[in-house]
Image (cartoon, grey):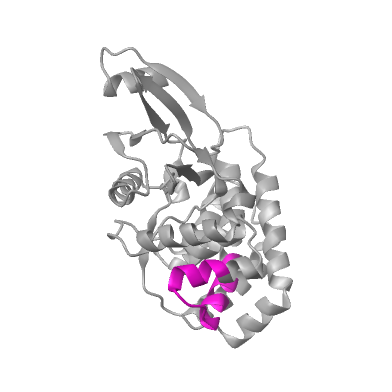
Amino acid sequence: MQPEDIAARVWPGRELDLEPLGGGITNRNFKVKVGDEAFVLRIGGKDTSFLGIDREAEHAATLAAAALGIAPEVVAFLEPEGYLVTRFIEGRVLPVDEVRRPEMLRQVAQTLRRVHDGSPFPTNFDSFRVVETYLAIARERGVQAPPEYERTKQTANAIERARGDQPRHPCHNDLLNANFIAADGDVRIVDWEYAGMGDRFFDLANFSINHELSDAENEELLTAYFGELRLQDLAALRLMRFMSDFREAMWGVVQQGLSELDFDFAGYADEHFERLERTAADPAFRETLGAGAPG
């Protein structure tokens, strides 16, 4: 079905203007103008359920985050396909350098805290299990495990032991720079398809590593989030930055067997394996992992 036909299900008989939105490598997104209003139509990619995406859960998480004023307003949810329509946010993607400024780090920290303290999401997200699931699906689709996997998984197992059982919070789990929109003096977060109940330090670490925060910037983020700087929080963030890249690398691996998009998923996986190896080589990381990381 063409995007125009899908949009017509939401606005039958209305004159519509559709414009593709770039940046995504999983879904197709379109800006839909209806009169003086603008919306986003999100059409899920092929086999995205194998990536752990539940469209009904995405809908619920977006509704919950929208109620907090953090996500865009949900306008429609088309079943059975799970197409999502939200109000278009008039704003701009925050450049990474701007995100790293102390005042913006404080704003992001406060926004994430509101998410994590908000209403529960209907699904769970466990980065330690996600990488295993991605490997199994990749093998089923004829994609070989990368040579780095076993060594990386051993480190992940050690991190899981060090972290122990953690309380679950509503988390976004995909805090890429493109998912942050500055609008009306506030920070909004889009793309809630991986949202679920999980370890809030994965979310914090996911944001940290994706914006390549320095030690000082990590301290600023955690101080703003918790109201104080604690060594155990720095330790947890340090370990979960590794897990963020491991999840991202394995996402690139499994996409090689799933996606039909013209994108270098193998190169994407390699990039994240290389970065997590740099993380693992950091003496502070090795010291933290050796000592364990209390929650």
Q: Name the residue rendered at 48%, 57% in the picture.
A: 108
> x and y percent of residue 20 in the render?
50, 25
Tell me where the magenta segment starts and ends, as one range. Answer: 220-241
In this view, 199 is above or below 229: above
Q: Residue at x 44, y 44 (%)?
A: 191
Going by the picture, which residue comes out furthest to the bottom? 291
* Quarter of the figure that contains the N terminus: top left
Q: Is residue 229 above or below residue 22?
A: below
In the image, residue 7 sits, relative to residue 177, either above or below, namely above
Q: Residue at x 44, y 73 (%)?
A: 226
Magenta stretch secondary structure, dominant:
helix
Image coordinates for residue 244, horizontal then vertical, percent:
56, 61
User: Which one is in front, 5 or 98?
Assistant: 98
Q: How far across and down, in percent of the image, does residue 209 sit? A: 61, 60
The image quadrant that residue 288 belongs to is bottom right
13 vs 258: above or below? above
Q: Is residue 143 visible?
A: no
Taking depth in this image into account, of 28 and 214 the one nearest to the observer is: 214
Asked whether 126 falls inside the magenta stretch, the response is no
Residue 255 position in % (x across, y down): 57, 44
- Judge from the rendering whether residue 266 lies leftward or rightward of residue 62; answer left or right: right
Which one is in front, 179 or 51? 179
The count of marks equals 0
